[in-house]
Amino acid sequence: MHDEKFKKLYEIKNLAEGVGREDKIESQHSKGKLTARERIELLLDAGSFLELDKYVIHRNDESPETKYYGDGVITGSGTIDGRQVFVYAYDFTVLGGSLGEMTSKKVVKVMSHALKVGTPIIGIIDSGGARIQEGAQSLDGYGDIFYHNTLASGVIPQITVSVGPCAGGAVYSPAMTDFVIMVESIGQMFVTGPEVVKEVLSQEVSFEELGGAKTHASKSGVAHMIAKNEYDCMEKIKRLLSFIPHNNTEISLIESQDDDNRLDPNLIKVLPENPYHPYDIKQIILSIVDKGDFYEIHELFAPNVVVGFARMGGKTVGIVANQPQFLAGALDIDSSNKAARFIRFCDSFNIPIITIVDTPGYLPGKDQEHHGIIRHGSKLLYAYCEATVPKITCIVGKAYGGAYIAMGSKNLRSDINLAWPTAEIAVLGPEAAITIIHRKDLKNSSDAIEKKKKLAEEYRKKFANPYIAAERGIIDLVIDPMETRAVIIKSLNTLSNKRESTLKKKHGNINL
């Protein structure tokens, strides 16, 4: 009797782990894809996975021949580099990884566990979507998942990986998580597929063009990162987790492996002599962070603003910087959304924000105005004002008009504001200001071009230099560029015990 029970146990265990489904597993491999179990093994520390609800089956009695243990998703917990995480991975070898009532209950259970324990939750998506045979029950399942995504937001980090199809209403769960990583060629996300688009709109579009990794990483902004393959994807998750805390009550901190007082005499050479010539802001970022280690987020989307994680003095920081290589570093709709979302994540998880400024303003034009630059641009202002973590801003070049205010200005309650001697802080750029102030003189001048150049230089010296702002306390310190790293780390140490109370309210009403 004892042996019979163990025999039954191992029979069920084998079925749950895919014995008898070798053809479907082989089909998965033939598409260049790993199975759900292989993905979990690749992601987690060896031998750390504790599977939950392994023997769950669906309750649709009209389809008894399609009852498989696990019911289309593998759930449980394990460790990544010794840190606890919870994970769910849709299993495409079981009913195409479709979501039914019991599938959703499994996902919701591990999300609830992750919230109670205070650990990150990682979702691996390879699913055909809602299970048609279960009708409204499958749709209700997505609703439960969306609700728990909302509960977890700002409490524990949520990471979603797209390694297969994700269509229809299913796409909104990844969109509600903090980070989405898509794998080239196999990751796909769209509300309606190419067939429906062709039928309804008579438009021919491929799966990759409609909802592939490159599309979502560069155009829609849905994907924060692209992975070359599934192995690269799992490494990206591990590196991302190394920068962020377990939950909103913890702080990421490791021992510094770099000299806090390291100087870089070549830093000033990064800026071109002509302030209107482009340069790569990442040169400055890589120079000032620990070991030149910067993990960029949303690299391909709205590249006129750079955001990402680094360490300074061993502490994780969030970097937000204008990128003069693209649109001269001007703020537009997409970059405002990108930076605002990143700032709010950092604030949720106690990560100080370092802002590096070189921007000529908000991007002008009919297209931006008609698509809501006022509405979207205000999100960046809101995010900075709302953030209570330490905020340090360093202006290295241009800081004009509304963009100066939006990029972590003192008025938005930035704690310490620094500037290089090269900083230009003004309502307008010198050339634009002179055109308005001296319109009549320039119109009547016999040599308007030379006169405008001379007046612009006078304006730059008299109004746009950082010492004017420093005299009024808007800038706390004008620093030698080579000291940037040392001064920022000292500022972080000064603000390490910052506490800031806010007005009691249910929540604010950010202009979405």
Image (tube, rainbow, N blue to C red):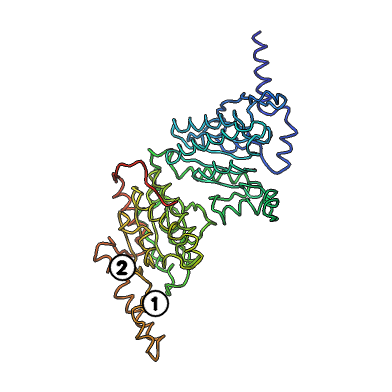
Viewer-closest of 159 and 480: 159
Residue 257 picture location, percent across and down: 41, 48
**What residue did someone put label 1 on?**
431
Residue 71 in sight from this viewpoint: yes
Q: Nearer the viewer, mark 2 or mark 1?
A: 1
Q: Amino acid at mark 2?
A: Pro
| Tag 2–tag 1 contact (CB < 8 Å) | no
Q: Residue furthest front?
A: 200
Q: For the residue carrying disc 1, how many other residues have a C-alpha within 10 Å: few (<14), some (14-19), or many (20+)?
A: some
For label 2, the residue is: 466
Q: Which mark is residue 112?
A: none
Quarter where residue 373 is shown: bottom left
Q: Is residue 364 above or below residue 488?
A: below
The span from disc 2 to disc 1 (Cα, nearest Å) is 18 Å
Crowding near the residue tagged with mark 2, few <14, some 14–19, many ≥20 C-alpha atoms within 10 Å: many
Q: Which of the 4 image quadrants contains residue 96?
A: top right
Q: Horizontal placement of 294 versus 134: left or right?
A: left
